[in-house]
């Protein structure tokens, strides 16, 4: 088939011309890493759940890792600051420590003093309070979703009974039922980390002189009745946290 060239203005021709592939190429994010005290490093992770990685997302990922790490290093660094002059005293024995070394030890000990509160009920309570309030907030979120799935299942059960004899409607309702079952599985999996976290928090609760809090889901919940039992169990944990802490989380 013959072609016909139609002359166009240069500006229009420039707009119609296909740009090279390099103009649409996605820039690869630069690898980011930070050196932390002690010689170790932390590296930014490509979080694909946040979309295509770029320099911005890599930077934020590294910042999210850095914050908790620096917080956890606060007391260990103060311990090292105290050990350094103490070791110098030991290595110089039997010579008495110099006034400069004694001053350094005193200053480091004063800085370390607040860290000892961490193993007392008074010092541990704020830590435990924040963790339990976080668990409570997550449980309320999960509760809301499980209640929605339970209500959906109850409605589907009634409609399935009414749809007997209507194959097309039955197929649609069964598909919705299967999706609800999958949602239940996902919700059950979301509860497992909360259960594990409560186990880890157990020793901290003892230090804070607070009662142990457990979350146990028996088996895999089946149908709306099984979800109701899960709702009751999760609500009981929320109520227990409220009893232990009072209204501080509200």
Image: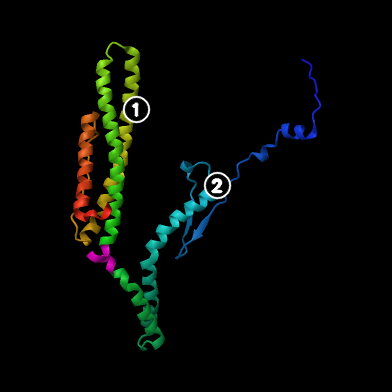
Where residue 217 sits: x, y (%)? Answer: 22, 40
Residue 120 magenta: yes
- Residue, far top: 165
Give the mark nearer the N terminus: 2 vs 1: 2
Identify which residue is drawn at 47% across, 64% down.
39
Number of other residues with Cα within 10 Å of mark 1, as a class: few under 14, some 14 to 19, many 20 or more: few
* The label number, if any, that marks residue 54 in the structure image: 2
Residue 240 visible in image: yes
Identify the secondary structure beneath mark 2.
loop
Residue 98 appears in the picture as rendered = no
* Relative to 41, 116 lies left or right: left
Vertical arrangement, residue 3 with respect to residue 165, above or below: below
At a point 37% along the width and 75% down the height, the residue shown is: 82
If the image is split into quadrants, where does the N terminus sit?
top right
Q: Does the magenta stretch include residue 149?
A: no
Residue picked out by circle 1: 179
Nearest the viewer among 98 and 233 is 233
**What span is in magenta?**
117-124
Residue placed at 28% from the left, 43% from the top? 140
Give above or below for 159 relative to 195: above
x then y, percent, for residue 125 = 25, 61
From the viewer's perspective, is residue 162 above or below residue 6? above
Position of 7 compared to 139: left or right? right
């Amino acid at each position: 088939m013959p072609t016909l060239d139609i002359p166009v203005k240069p500006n229009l021709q420039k707009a119609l011309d296909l740009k090279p592939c390099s103009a649409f190429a996605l820039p690869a994010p630069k690898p980011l890493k930070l050196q932390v005290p002690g010689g170790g490093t932390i590296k930014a992770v490509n979080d694909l759940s946040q979309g295509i990685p770029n320099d911005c997302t890599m930077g934020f990922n590294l910042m999210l890792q850095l914050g908790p790490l620096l917080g956890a290093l606060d007391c260990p660094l103060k311990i090292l600051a105290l050990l350094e002059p103490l070791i110098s005293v030991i290595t110089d024995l039997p010579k008495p420590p110099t006034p400069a070394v004694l001053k350094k030890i005193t200053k480091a000990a004063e800085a370390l003093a607040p860290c000892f509160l961490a193993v007392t009920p008074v010092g541990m309570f704020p830590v435990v309070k924040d963790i339990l309030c976080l668990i409570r907030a997550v449980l309320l979120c999960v509760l809301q979703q499980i209640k929605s799935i339970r209500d959906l299942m109850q409605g589907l059960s009634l409609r399935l009974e009414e749809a007997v004899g209507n194959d097309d409607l039955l197929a649609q309702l069964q598909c919705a039922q299967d999706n609800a079952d999958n949602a239940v599985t996902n919700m059950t999996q979301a509860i497992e980390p909360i259960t594990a976290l409560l186990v880890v928090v157990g020793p901290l609760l003892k230090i804070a002189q607070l009662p142990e809090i457990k979350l146990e889901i028996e088996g895999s919940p089946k149908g709306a009745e099984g979800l109701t039992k899960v709702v009751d169990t999760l609500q009981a944990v929320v109520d227990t946290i409220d009893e232990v802490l009072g209204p501080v989380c509200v």
